[in-house]
Image (tube, rainbow, N blue to C red):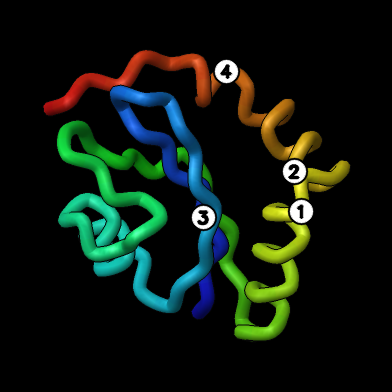
């Protein structure tokens, strides 16, 4: 199973969209500074949203679409607006 996911940094509020076939390991990698795009000195990345796909290509295509700052990303962010507003503690 392939997962397209959206994570939010609990201190900066930054968001990151990615895809993986092991969400637990990928989230751990983000939080342990093993990804150059999400490396932070403090704080934690929190999973906000995930979509599952049986095809790697479908997941890759969806991730690419969401990273293009077009209608797909704007619709997703609008749909998740309440989840993105929630204050997330460092714990």
Reading the chain from its start, which is encountered first: label 4 or label 3? 3
Circle 3: element type = strand
Q: Report which quarter residue 11 is drawn in.
A: top left
29 relative to 59 in the view: left or right: left
Per the image, the residue denoted by label 1 is 68
Circles 4 and 3, Cβ within 8 Å, touching? The answer is no
Q: Residue at x 35, y 74 (%)?
A: 22
Residue 79: image location, x then y, percent: 71, 30
Circles 4 and 2, Cβ within 8 Å, touching? The answer is no
Circles 1 and 2, Cβ within 8 Å, touching? The answer is yes
**Along the line of sight, which residue is nearer the eye, 41 or 79?**
41
Reading the chain from its start, which is encountered first: label 1 or label 2? 1
Per the image, the residue denoted by label 3 is 5
Disc 1 versus disc 2: distance between alpha carbons? 7 Å
Circle 4: element type = helix
Reading the chain from its start, which is encountered first: label 4 or label 1? 1
Mark nearer the viewer, 4 or 2: 2
Reading the chain from its start, which is encountered first: label 4 or label 2? 2
Circle 1: element type = loop
Per the image, the residue denoted by label 2 is 73
Q: Is residue 5 above or below residue 52?
A: above
Q: On the rendered image, what quadrant is the C terminus found in?
A: top left
Per the image, the residue denoted by label 4 is 82
Residue 30: image location, x then y, percent: 29, 56
Q: Residue at x 52, y 67 (%)?
A: 19
Reading the chain from its start, which is encountered first: label 3 or label 1? 3
């Amino acid at each position: 199973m392939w997962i397209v996911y959206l994570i939010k940094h609990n201190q900066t509020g930054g968001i990151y969209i990615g895809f993986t076939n092991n969400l637990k390991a990928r989230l751990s990698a983000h939080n342990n500074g093993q990804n150059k795009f999400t490396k932070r000195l403090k704080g934690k990345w929190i999973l906000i949203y995930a979509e599952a796909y049986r095809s790697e290509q479908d997941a890759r295509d969806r991730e690419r679409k969401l990273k293009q700052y077009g209608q797909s990303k704007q619709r997703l962010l609008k749909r998740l607006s309440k989840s993105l507003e929630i204050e997330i503690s460092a714990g």
